[in-house]
Image (tube, coloured by chain):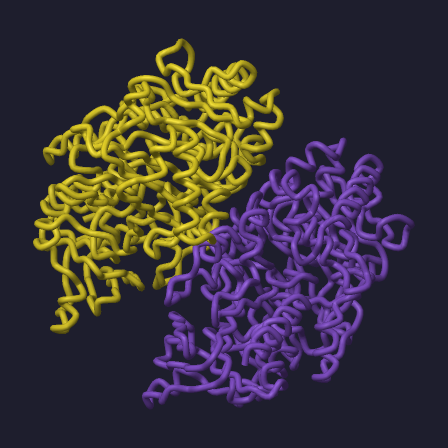
Chain colours: A purple, B yellow
Amino acid sequence: MGVTRRGLIGGAAGAAIATGAAQAKKKPAPRTADVIVIGAGLAGLAAAHDVVAGGRSALVLEARKRVGGRTLNQPIGGGKVVEIGGQWIGPTQDALAKVAKELGVGTYKTFNTGSNVYYRNGILLPYRTDTPGLGAVPPDPSGGADAEQAIVKLDNMAGEVPRDQPWAASSAVEWDGQTVETWKQNNLATDNGRFLLDVGIEAVFAAEPRDISLLFLLFYIAGAGNETTPGTFERLINTADGAQDSRFVGGSQLVSIRMAKRLGKRVILGAAARRIEQSRSGVRVFSDAGLVARGKRVIVAMAPSLAGRLEYHPALPALRDQLTQRFPNGSVIKCEAVYDTPFWREAGLTGQAVSDASPVRITFDNTPPDGKPGVLLGFIEGTAARVYTRKSAAERRAAVLNNFATYFGDRALKPNAYYEMNWSTDPWTRGCYTGFTPPGVLLDYGAALRRPVGRFHWAGTETSTIWAGYMDGAVRSGQRAAKEVLAKL
Amino acid sequence: MGVTRRGLIGGAAGAAIATGAAQAKKKPAPRTADVIVIGAGLAGLAAAHDVVAGGRSALVLEARKRVGGRTLNQPIGGGKVVEIGGQWIGPTQDALAKVAKELGVGTYKTFNTGSNVYYRNGILLPYRTDTPGLGAVPPDPSGGADAEQAIVKLDNMAGEVPRDQPWAASSAVEWDGQTVETWKQNNLATDNGRFLLDVGIEAVFAAEPRDISLLFLLFYIAGAGNETTPGTFERLINTADGAQDSRFVGGSQLVSIRMAKRLGKRVILGAAARRIEQSRSGVRVFSDAGLVARGKRVIVAMAPSLAGRLEYHPALPALRDQLTQRFPNGSVIKCEAVYDTPFWREAGLTGQAVSDASPVRITFDNTPPDGKPGVLLGFIEGTAARVYTRKSAAERRAAVLNNFATYFGDRALKPNAYYEMNWSTDPWTRGCYTGFTPPGVLLDYGAALRRPVGRFHWAGTETSTIWAGYMDGAVRSGQRAAKEVLAKL
């Protein structure tokens, strides 16, 4: 069973929010606010909240008929949900934690008790996650140590990267001149170590080491901390104490849904912005629903590649436009199978696998907090997502369940329900988890990432200096953009 | 003196071509043709011509108020022009040569008599272009041989790359895993050799070695020939017998202008396509000028990054959409200074310089065929274009003329006229010379470059297997797309 592209908005909140399409039927009068925000993901909603809290008016235009951007709850019956978009929260993701707390959205630990599974060259090796060493690195006899020394090196290099201007690192020219693949070839000695780094990169970026600039990886690592805690690669890949540490009660989209509810009629759904104009006196945003929004400033809260598809008047400066040509989104298909119970727990397994099989190389236990039904989550990432996007849904399902069975036994072959979300096909997302940069882009275009263009301001997780690419970075980016705008109003 | 963004269409031909804007005033009826072509550059015009020649009807929608895409004539008085876009033709560019001949557009040799200038570390070294060795490589005592051995290596590797599917080369994974920069660091031993390769890459791609996948470079080299002649890097960079061998009488845009004239009212200017729909029965294209064009097939004849900015219904498949996120255009500002005479010729100079100064590292004599007025042409490419795009036109002009004076003497400081074209700011181009791919893209997305999506077909020089990125590739791509479409009609 697939998921419709437009997805769902939580019932009560959905009803409270105006839809542009409905308004279009009555030929809407122009809407006016000080700040027009484009995109009702976490970034746009956080921006609008802070604008309003700062005493100015805001209007949020959202293309989809739901809020939450790259987060999306999937109902699985009995009032329960699983996330088929971004879902976790971990230590140092303070901005997201604060917003969730304000809104009464609780968290709980990702299931992490027992052994993970390491599947490599046809051999299945369960391993305790509480063994000494770097938690997420399987104790592969040859590759584990190799991967660990590489991670230490990467962390040290990341320590030299200024979060707000990675292009200013003293080795930036060297690091932005090469792919992560090249660095891997030169700095890991074993096949197994290289494999572990591959899986780590795919899990973090939904892209391949060859796709990504080494400097971008280091920037990403540097951001995996908070104002007082340096980032580490471990914090990106770990479950306990890492970016996969905890989950949201009610699903991660609930944060956005409550943020939108708080904003009420300021959020307009089904209103895809197409054209943004600025003049000396203000801005106008033209959207699909026939809605024209007028204001003083615009905050574009979208991934850079999608932001580049809007029509701007006057046209954007060369650097900003070309940046949007150079910031592709990753490739991921998120797959979830629902069972009566999390049967792998009985076998002493966490539900987490690291594997060289295809298409699913990373899995998690995604069971709701009360322990039922059992949900296995598998990611198809990077090249595998690009290959499997062309297969039929039935072929994908069969391949994914086959992987699950390899890791957790044949009971995995018969789920009660199966969901998948291919974010690359979603017309308002076009790839997850995040935008990344190939070599050369941060050096020559990085300065255009956040720099406002007159009355146009840029938000979205990719613009964050901390936890870029994560929900936390999205919230931070919206708050920063709101601050920028409030200072000008 | 700058050039207006919308540019010019040649007078008589311009008058003969309908403009969408004018039609919009009278609420145009839907236009209908078998094939709707988007883009009136060489690719779109060639496609439309072949569709019509094949007995089917075609309509070409062009966003600009001129034809010619990335070619553009700049009048310099006395009925003469210089090109401020693509301009040269060379051996093996047979498709372009054939079209030009049919249309009566003649060619003449690029001025190449005397010595080139090599400027490096503050030292000016004139050198004969007819010395033995690879024509375009300056006889630098340390770097020349180094660059030559690198070029021989690249040519050999390119010989292993299938033009129509570079991702199928036996070393494709290795070559698409690294930047040209990485390969350069590993395969050239001297600073001067590396510098020469840098300038060569910048001159060919208007991008830096770190921006580009090694496999893409090899694909490009492989394409620099014809059906019976293997491509070589030398043919990309050489003047005599290379891609800069000859020029068009009346300017390169004249080819497009005459192609458009031949198509007559089938070409509609000022009609930017925004949305393309396909159904079981046909296609509809909605454009800015209020024009709706209906037909059976669409040929999108635009660079991939710009094609990605159209709205498609149904939405494009993941691979095609994500390809358009990963195919950025290069960065170039083309600068031309007009003098009474080509005074450098008197000093025995060709007007061609290779330099490590900034911003202009490559120059040419761009004097009209009758030898007056004298025109010097300088390119600001890659990083230099990204830096200089933020400076004022006056600053750019001063810096460019200063470079010209360094290479050719102080008479260069006082031109009678000065023109520049920053293709990255042009809203309908957003970068020249061409789209290129960073690492990883050809491997995972290459197959989506030409593969039609139902009734949508793809043209544009980037889709050519021969001379991709050049005017010849544009013509070939249009002809191939027409063939594809005719087979379906």
Left or right: where B466 falls relative to A122: left
* Residue B393 x %, y %: 39, 52
Asked which quadrant contains residue A88, the reply is: bottom right
* Residue B292 x %, y %: 20, 66
Residue at figure coordinates x 36%, y 88% from the top left: A28
* Residue B44 x %, y %: 23, 47
Depicted A288 relative to depicted A92: above or below: below
Left or right: where A347 falls relative to A37: right
Residue at figure coordinates x 21%, y 34% from the top left: B373
Depicted B363 relative to depicted A253: above or below: above
How many marks do you count on the picture? 0
Depicted A387 relative to depicted A32: above or below: above
Which of the pair A14/B86 is nearer the observer? B86
Which of the pair A210/B368 is nearer the observer? B368
Which of the pair A162/B275 is nearer the observer? A162
Task: In the displayed orientation, state which residue is furthest to the top.
Answer: B132
Asked which quadrant contains residue B474, the reply is: top left
Residue at figure coordinates x 62%, y 77% from the top left: A46
Which of the pair A326/B445 is nearer the observer? A326
Residue B92 visible within the image: no
